[in-house]
Amino acid sequence: MKHRTLRLIAWRLLMALPILFGVIVVTFVLIRALPGDPAIVYASGPNMSQEDIDAIRRAMGLDKSVFEQFLIYLNNIAHLNFGNSLVTGQPVLKDFGERLPATLELAVFAFALSLVVALPVGVLSALYRDSWIDQLVRVITSVSAAMPGFFFGLILIFIFYFLMGIAPEPIGRLSGWSIAPPTVTGFMTIDAALIGDWEIFWEALGKMLMPAASMAIFAVAPLMRMMRGGMIDALDSDYIKAARAYGIPRRKILLQYALPNAMLPVLATMGMVLSTMLGANIMIEKLFAWPGIGSYSVNALTGVDYAPVQAFVLIVAVLFVLMTLAIDILSAAIDPRYKLKG
Amino acid sequence: MKRRDFLNVAAMTGVSLLGLRLGVTPANAQGRNDVIRVLLEDSPNTFDPSGTGYNPASCNISWNVYDRLVTFGVKPVEDKEDAFIYDYSNIVGQAAESYEVSEDGTTITFKMREGATFHDGRPVTAHDAKWSLDRAVNLPTSKAQLGTGSLTSPDQFTVVDDMTFQITLPQADRFTLPNLCILFPAIINSELAKEHATTEDPWAEAWLKTNEAGGGPFTVSRYVADQQFVLDRFADWKNGEVASAARIMAQIVPVASSRRASAERAEADLVRELSGRDIKDMIDAGKPRVLGISNPARMVSIALNSEMAPFDNKLVRQAVAYAVPYQEMFESVLYSRGTPLFGGSAETTEARYPQPLPYTQDLEKAKALLAEAGMADGFETTFTIDSSLGTTAEPIAILMQEALGKIGVTVKIEKVPSAQMGQLQTDRALPMYIAVGGAWLADPDYFFRIFYNSTRRWNYGNYQNEEMSKLVEETRFETDEEVYKTKVIRMVELAKDDVPLILLWSPFQDTVLSDAVHGYEYMFHGQLELRPLYKS
């Protein structure tokens, strides 16, 4: 079994290669199909002539044919060279190395936050179906599903920072006065904990609360609904009736028999939610001046900075592939009927 | 979960929340005299003053980290307390202690400052000046600009001795000294830079992009792209007055509402790039100090493509100019945070530009002009807006659409990203759009040369007029003041009559300051001049 799983993982990773190649081709072509000439954007002085613009174009290698540019790009990727960002002037990999942990930390925290809220409430509303709890939860999920995270973030800032002054300034991962711990994992909270600087740890956690809540707001509704639906299905099934008939204690029925079976659809949703959080929290990152990959790649896109955009799509694609794989493995572990397929 | 576990968790959560509350401690910016906290919208993208593709925000670093041979003096802003603005007519020594212009104006000799050093302690010599200027006239970004001051070739720059530097010009040029005051001809530590130059990269562009080799009043002590930069005072700086030892801590906050919240809670000392609406609200609430300084050389306008039908007809352009709801736009879009460039007098007496054009909204006149042009039934056209101009562009476009609808012109609004905008401007493909511009040098002929004459994208109205070309040519080296004035007045008349650009206003550079900050100075580039800032 172990051996077989490993082989399947290897197979799946191998199968991901054509997908990634497709992603590379599509992004490469798409970004060049976009209107806007980087050389003109970078020739920013009002006295620059056409020759100056051409000189810049040559220096950027954009005078070569698209196919030639693509081969150069492929060769560079093979050597793990993703090029330099024109906007920050640094190698793209270094930029991502600095920003990806910030995005990951926030996404993981927001994800945990939404699980902590959504799952117990989902179970409760399934247990007390159609009671006032269930109705209330329904109202809350409808509102939260309709609320754009960005807008929710603005409300949070207005109330907790601006009016009440109990939340920290909604800017960045640490207040400007604090000294960041030496980077080990890139997760501010973990790095602070590693050197035992609890003041920074709490500060970093506090800074994450509002952006994480803004991100969690959209995730809560689907998770809660899936949890409720899964739990209802499980509770209505024959094996639960049988378990009840045997007189097994209620708590044991819920936790040991119903919950694992109800988790299966939730797990799939969780995968999707986490992926979305990683890739699509650009507005939240902008709002809270969060130094993540979302705001970075949008800046690159508006600045027709090809290298970071290409790298961003590729990195997110890799994350998606890994995530789906992890979810599949987890599902298989929970449900024996669920077979890992190549 | 067991009951006891639950209680444990609950207690832990309580502790955590308490911790978070303690972790907040809003470090009030005003209470710290040693640090000036600045919030900006955009991140600098290079340290190199002549960096390819440098963005305006990069001046915040390169301007403050490097010195130039000479710089503009300052004068107090009229009707504003505790605020200063650069004085275009007063050019003073900076890295050069003094300078001397020869009788015929073709040689300028600079005396380098004794005892001045770069940040690494090496003395600032004429060799550094030579290398820096050689570099500036070689790199595409700075080359073209310096050409407007007759600075084109390294042959013009001579090292007389270690502390004497000389520039020779083909003819006297009133744009040479102002061009030496702008961003590009920064004095670079040539020995340090050369250590990082290679055969492919003789001017060390790659290294200077993320490293500084300056001798200016600040050193970069921390820089994280898109997040923050910290500038420390250079203790041995000798090239001017030093107001304080406070370090500058700048943070990049892309969303305006977050910057505004910090400004209102007095957690920042200096906040830039807030919308007119935000500024007006803050002034009405009477809380923070807002300094709105007008830069007369900046303008916001509506460009009409003078070479594209139907705007190739002057009457149609005038009709549009009479249809613009100027006052309404000024109040509801800009919240009156600027100087109007409309409703001026038809007669031209002053030789300066931009100045108010003689247009106000007059729909009857607009209709009559359209009829005269043979377009009584109107026409269809497109109004293009740059998506990066967000808060002002869209309402302007909508007001234009509404107003032009009243004279029978159907307008379609098209929104494009700024990258594409540059391309469309270069290709002259747009009939009508919002054009924003500002000149670093204040002479009116310079403004006309860029915005009303060139073949480049900055001639927004695609204006091709022989008389204008001739006047622009003739005024280039004109030294007789009376002749110059007459010719400029003629150019202004052409701009008023032909209206390739419908001027709207010159926006204020609004800066929100905490009560503790003093000495604010506005520089021609509109970015931060940090040296004179101090706290008390």
Image (cartoon, rainbow, N blue to C red):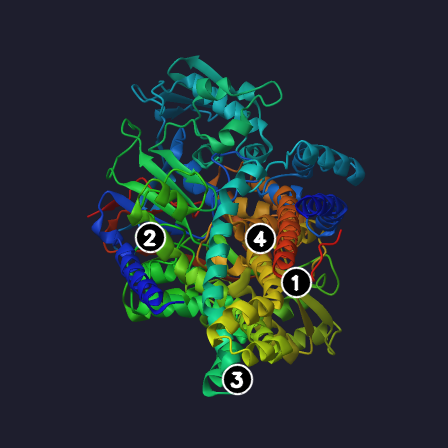
| Residue A303 shown left or right of residue B313 in the figure | left
- Structural distance between the alpha carbons of marks 3 and 1: 61 Å
Q: Chain of mark 3?
A: A
Residue displayed at 57% across by 73% down: B399
Label drawn at residue A203: 2
Is label 3 or label 4 in front? 3
Residue displayed at 46% across by 27% down: B105
Query: On the image, numbered disc 1 is attached to which residue?
Result: B432
| Residue B206 shown left or right of residue A341 in the figure | left
Q: Chain of mark 2?
A: A
**In the displayed image of the protein, which residue is found farthest to the front?**
A246
- Structural distance between the alpha carbons of marks 3 and 4: 44 Å
Q: How many marks?
A: 4
- Structural distance between the alpha carbons of marks 2 and 1: 50 Å
Q: Chain of mark 4?
A: A
Query: On the image, numbered disc 4 is attached to which residue?
Result: A298
Mark 1 neighbour density, 10 Å: few (under 14) some (14–19) many (20 or more): many
Dot 3 or dot 4: first in sequence order is 3
Quadrant position of residue A264: bottom right
Query: On the image, numbered disc 3 is attached to which residue?
Result: A129
Is label 1 or label 4 in front? 4
Quadrant position of residue A209: bottom left
